[in-house]
Image: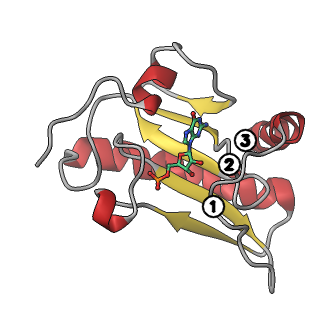
Amino acid sequence: MTAYDPDNIFAKILRGEIPSTRVYEDDETLAFMDIMPRADGHLLVIPKTPCRNVLDATSDQLAAVMSTVQKLARAAKAAFDADGVTIQQFNEAAGGQEVFHLHFHVLPRFEGVSMRPPGNMGDFDLIAEHAEKIRAALD
Ligand code: 5GP
């Protein structure tokens, strides 16, 4: 398996080298907004320690991340009064992965509403508003 690249975008976000809209963090995990949201409230949950994806993660990393995924899924669903939540996770390029630091997508969903196509930059003010709604639902 390819080695972990410490210069991937999410490693830079963790080190504060590039900006992100943080929603929640604890000792082991960080949740922040996706800059190309496929649904309002689309966020990402990552471990603070290095691993590429599920294939090389330790059980401790997975346990910590999944606990935060559940916390944020509940908060995002409540914040948007959504009907459901989609959790997505991709492994290696062939599996659809583009950023090689383990991450889970959390997307609030509504009956009959499709996800938006990938690759479209979101509106930063709107993303900040959505982050604030999710933060408030965590309290
Ligand atoms: P995946 O690796 O799961 O296919 O997708 C990576 C995700 O990271 C995409 O949803 C993309 O919009 C998001 N992303 C890529 N670059 C950045 C960035 O610099 N900041 C944030 N917050 N999200 C990013």
Instruction: Residue at 63%, 20% (x, y): give it.
Output: 19
Q: Secondary structure at mark 1?
A: loop
Q: Secondary structure at mark 2?
A: loop
Frontmost residue, 55 versus 122? 122
x, y percent for residue 115: 71, 71
x, y percent for residue 60: 25, 42
User: Is ligand 1 closer than 8 angstroms to the Cβ of mark 2?
Assistant: yes
Quarter assignment of residue 82: bottom right
User: Is ligand 1 closer than 8 angstroms to the Cβ of mark 1?
Assistant: yes
Report the quarter where the C terminus lies: top right
Checking the image for residue 118, the label placed there is 1
Tag 1: amino acid: Pro
Frontmost residue, 48 versus 1? 1
Say if 55 sits above or below 14 in the image: below
Tag 2: amino acid: Met
Say if 111 sits above or below 53 in the image: below
Q: CA distance from mark 2 to mark 3?
A: 23 Å
**Would you call the spot at circle 3 few (<14 residues within 10 Å), some (14-19), or many (20 or more)?**
some
Residue under label 3: 138
